[in-house]
Amino acid sequence: MLFRMKRAEKAKRIHAILDELYPVVPVPLDHVDPFTLLVAVVLSAQTTDKKVNQVTPELFRRAPGPRAMAALPVDEIRALIREIGLAPQKAKALQGLSQLILERHDGEVPRTFEELEALPGVGHKTASVVMAQAFGVPAFPVDTHIHRLGTRWGLTNGRSVEQTEADLKQLFPRDAWNKLHLQIIYFGREHCPARRHDLATCPICGFAATKARIEDERRKNEPQRRAKA
C-alpha cells in the first residue's frame, strides 16, 4: 500500500477512479428550478435526501415558488414537512427566505454566495450547492460524507469543514469541483461507510488512507467483530 503517496498524487488517482465509477452524477435532490433546489437543500440538513424527496412533491404542489411559499402560514409548512428533522426551524426558514427573495431579489433566487447566505436557513454549504448545481458556478460543497472521506483519504487534516473545502479546492481542478462533490457523496454512500468498513480493501481507502487511519479503523471495528462472533 502506498502510505507515503503525496496528496496531489492521491487526488489525481482518486479523481480518475471516481470518473470511472460515476461518469454521470445526477443531483440527488428532486427539483425543477433554482428555488425548488434551494428549498430541498435547506430541508436536507440532518435529513436523508430520500426523506426530502418524499415530502417535497406535496410541498412544491402547494408552493412551487417564493410567492406561494411566503404566503403559506408557518404551521402549514411545518405540517407538510413534519417528517423532516428540525421541521419547526426549517418551516420558519422557508417562509422567511421566500419573503426576502420577493423583497430583495424580485422573486428570483440570488446568484451570489453573499446574497444566498444572507437568507434564513442558508449557510455556506447550502449556498455552494445552489451556486454549483443551479447556476454552474464552480464550488465544492462539503457535507458530512465529503468531510469524512477527505480526512480518511489524507487529503485534509479534517479539523473543520472550512479547511476541508480549502484543501480539496487546491487539490482538484476547478472545472471538476461541481461534479466531484457529487461523486464523493455517491462513493461514500455506496462504497465507503462511516462504520464497519475495511479500509484496506476499499478501492480508494486501500491506497489513499494512511496506515495510522487504517489501524485506527480496525481498532474501532474489532469490538463489533467480536460481538458477532
Image (cartoon, helix red, strand yellow):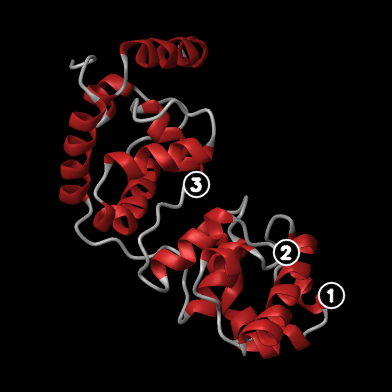
Left/right of residue 23 with respect to residue 195 in the rendered view? left
The structure residue drawn at horizontal position 34% and vertical position 30%, both measured from the top left corner, is: 155
Location of residue 142 in the rendering, given as x and y in whole percent from the top left corner: 47, 47
Location of residue 56 in the rendering, given as x and y in whole percent from the top left corner: 59, 74
Q: Amino acid at mark 1?
A: Asp
Q: Amino acid at mark 3?
A: Asp
Count of numbered circles on the image? 3
Q: Quadrant of residue 133?
A: bottom left
Q: Secondary structure at mark 1?
A: helix
Location of residue 82 in the rendering, given as x and y in whole percent from the top left corner: 74, 65
Crowdedness near tag 2: few (<14), some (14–19) or many (≥20) residues, C-alpha within 10 Å = many
The numbered disc on residue 143 is 3
Which comes sooner in the sequence, label 1 or label 3?
1
The numbered disc on residue 75 is 1
User: Does any portion of residue 54 appear in the rendered image?
Assistant: no
Reply above or below: 165 against 29: above
Q: CA distance from mark 2 to mark 1?
A: 11 Å
Which comes sooner in the sequence, label 2 or label 1?
1
Left/right of residue 114 with respect to residue 217 in the rendered view? right
The numbered disc on residue 90 is 2
Instruction: Tell me whether circle 2 and circle 1 mark residues in contact (CB < 8 Å).
Output: no
Q: Secondary structure at mark 3?
A: loop
Q: Secondary structure at mark 2?
A: helix
Of 140 and 90, the residue lying toward us: 140
Q: CA distance from mark 1 to mark 3?
A: 29 Å
